[in-house]
Image (cartoon, rainbow, N blue to C red):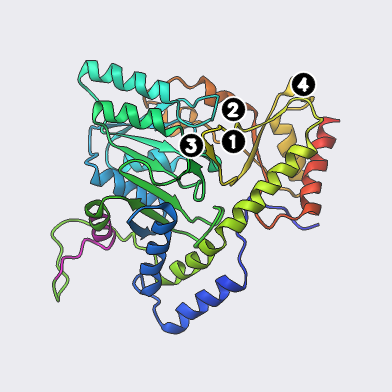
C-alpha cells in the first residue's frame, strides 16, 4: 500500500503545459508576463484591484504589517490557534504578539474577546498597532463584528487567509477583508506554486509599496540605487505560471474536498465521540482540511491513539494546531483566554483531505479510525 498524505498537491497536464511554456519563453527570473497575469487573475478571483506575488505567505504578512506601521515595541492581537507564521511575522518587526483565544463556535479568533480587549486597552491608552485574523482550515473568521471593533478604535486589520483561498464570508471572498489579505501557495495548500504567496489589497498605494519593498527596494534608476532596506520576496515567473494553472482548477479542488468531507461524515455518522469542525452559517469554507475532534470517553480512544494507528497504517494525520500560547517560543507573550483552543488541540485531528484522494484510499482511512474505536 502506498502512503496516504494529509494534503498533497494535485497537478496535471495544464500545470505541465504552462510551466513548460514559461520555461521555453526564457522568463525564468522573478519577472515576466506570468507574474503580472497571475496577480491580475488572483485579484480578480478575490474581487480586489491589487495583488503582489511574493515568495511565501509569511513574507506577505511581514510586508503588510510593516506597511501598516507596526514596529519595535508595538503589540499586535493575533489568534493563538494558528500556525506559527502568523505571530512570527509580528516578531520580525520587533513587536509583541498578544495571543487571543478562539471561539468554540467557529475555531477562529473570538470576536467578543477582541472587542473586549480593544475596549480595555483603549481605556488604558495602549491600543495595539494591528489585529491579525486567521481563516482557519479553509473557513473565514467572523468579520462583521471583528471589523466593527477595529473601526471603532481605529486599529487596522490584516487577514491571514493563507488556508482559505476560495472560501467566502457572507458572499465575499476570503482575503478581501481589512487593509490587506494574505494567501499562501505552499505545497499543502488548496492550490500551490510549490512555495509562494500573495498580498492582496484594495489600496494601490499599499500594493505598490509592497511590490517595491519585495524587490529589494530598488529605486527607478539605470544603476542599482536603494534609499531604504528592502527584501528579496518576489515570486518567480516560473512558479507564477504554475500558480495560474492551479488557479484555473480551484473550483475543482474545492468541490473534491467538499465531497471528501461528506464521505468522512457518512463514514463516522454512527460513531460516538466524533465531531467535525463547526461550519458557521455566515460563510462557505474551501474545505481545505477535514478536522475532527475525538471525545476519548465516548469514542474509546483519544486523538493521539487514533493518529498513531493511522501512522502505523502509513496514513498521515496531524493534530490540530498547537496553540501559540502553549508553544515554548511564546512563553512570555500576553494571552487573552486560551482554554477554548487548548481544548480543540487536545482532541483535534486533521485527516487526509487532498483533492486527489480517491474513495478506496479514503475508505482505508475510515476503516482505521473505526477499528481504533472498536
Is 213 covered by the magenta stretch?
A: yes
Front-most of 14 and 230? 14
Q: Which mark is residue 82?
A: 3
- Residue 70, given in percent of the width and then of the height, sits at 24, 39
Where the N terminus falls, by quadrant? bottom right
- Residue 353, given in percent of the width and then of the height, sits at 66, 48
Q: Which segment is the magenta one?
A: 209-220
Circles 2 and 1: CB atoms closer than 8 Å: yes
Query: Callout 2: helix, strand or loop?
Result: helix
Q: Looking at the image, is mark 4 or mark 2 earlier in the sequence?
A: 4
Q: Looking at the image, is mark 3 or mark 1 earlier in the sequence?
A: 3
The residue that mark 1 highlights is 320
> In this view of the protein, can residue 246 be seen by the observer?
yes
- Residue 232, given in percent of the width and then of the height, sits at 31, 61
Q: Looking at the image, is mark 4 or mark 3 earlier in the sequence?
A: 3
- Spatial distance from mark 1 to mark 4, Cα to Cα? 19 Å
Query: Callout 4: helix, strand or loop?
Result: helix
Q: Looking at the image, is mark 2 or mark 1 earlier in the sequence?
A: 1
Where the C terminus falls, by quadrant? top right
Query: Callout 3: helix, strand or loop?
Result: loop
Q: Which mark is residue 344?
A: 2
Based on the displayed image, in which of its 4 quarters is residue 66 positioned?
A: top left
The residue that mark 4 highlights is 298
> In this view of the protein, can residue 316 be seen by the observer?
no
Image point 29% across, 59% down: which residue?
Answer: 214
Mark 2, other Cα within 10 Å: few <14 / some 14–19 / many ≥20: many
- Spatial distance from mark 4 to mark 3, Cα to Cα? 27 Å
Q: Is residue 356 left or right of residue 279?
A: right
Position of 362 relative to 346 (above/below): below
Amino acid at each position: 500500500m502506498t502512503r496516504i498524505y494529509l494534503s498533497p498537491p494535485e497537478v496535471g497536464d495544464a500545470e505541465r503545459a504552462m510551466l513548460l511554456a514559461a520555461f521555453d519563453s526564457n522568463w525564468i527570473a522573478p519577472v515576466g508576463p506570468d507574474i503580472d497575469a497571475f496577480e491580475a487573475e488572483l485579484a480578480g478571483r478575490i474581487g480586489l484591484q491589487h495583488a503582489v506575488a511574493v515568495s511565501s505567505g509569511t513574507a506577505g504578512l511581514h510586508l503588510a504589517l510593516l506597511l501598516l506601521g507596526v514596529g519595535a515595541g508595538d503589540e499586535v492581537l493575533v489568534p493563538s490557534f494558528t500556525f506559527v507564521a502568523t505571530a512570527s511575522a509580528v516578531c520580525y518587526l520587533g513587536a509583541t504578539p498578544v495571543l487571543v483565544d478562539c471561539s468554540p463556535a467557529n475555531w477562529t479568533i473570538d470576536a467578543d474577546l477582541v472587542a473586549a480587549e480593544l475596549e480595555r486597552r483603549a481605556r488604558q491608552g495602549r491600543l495595539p498597532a494591528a489585529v491579525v485574523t486567521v481563516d482557519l482550515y479553509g473557513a473565514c473568521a467572523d468579520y462583521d463584528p471583528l471589523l466593527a471593533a477595529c473601526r471603532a478604535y481605529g486599529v487596522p486589520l490584516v487577514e491571514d487567509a493563507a488556508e482559505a483561498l476560495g472560501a467566502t464570508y457572507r458572499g465575499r471572498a476570503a482575503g478581501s477583508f481589512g487593509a490587506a489579505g494574505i494567501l499562501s501557495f505552499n505545497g499543502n495548500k488548496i492550490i500551490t506554486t510549490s512555495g509562494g504567496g500573495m498580498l492582496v489589497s484594495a489600496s494601490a498605494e499599499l500594493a505598490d509599496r509592497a511590490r517595491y519593498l519585495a524587490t529589494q527596494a530598488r529605486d527607478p534608476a539605470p544603476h542599482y540605487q536603494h534609499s531604504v532596506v528592502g527584501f528579496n520576496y518576489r515570486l518567480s515567473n516560473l512558479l507564477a505560471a504554475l500558480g495560474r494553472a492551479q488557479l484555473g482548477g480551484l473550483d475543482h479542488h474545492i468541490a473534491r474536498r467538499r465531497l471528501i468531507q461528506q464521505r468522512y461524515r457518512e463514514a463516522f455518522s454512527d460513531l460516538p465521540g466524533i465531531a467535525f469542525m463547526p461550519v458557521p452559517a455566515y460563510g462557505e469554507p474551501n474545505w481545505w482540511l477535514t478536522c475532527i475532534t475525538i471525545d476519548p470517553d465516548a469514542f474509546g480512544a483519544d486523538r493521539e491513539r487514533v493518529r498513531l494507528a493511522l501512522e502505523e497504517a502509513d496514513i498521515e494525520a496531524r493534530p490540530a494546531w498547537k496553540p501559540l500560547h502553549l508553544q515554548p517560543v511564546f512563553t512570555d507573550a500576553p494571552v487573552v483566554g486560551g482554554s477554548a483552543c487548548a481544548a480543540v488541540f487536545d482532541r483535534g485531528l486533521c485527516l487526509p483531505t487532498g483533492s486527489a484522494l480517491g474513495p478506496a484510499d479514503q475508505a482505508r482511512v475510515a476503516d482505521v479510525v473505526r477499528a481504533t474505536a472498536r
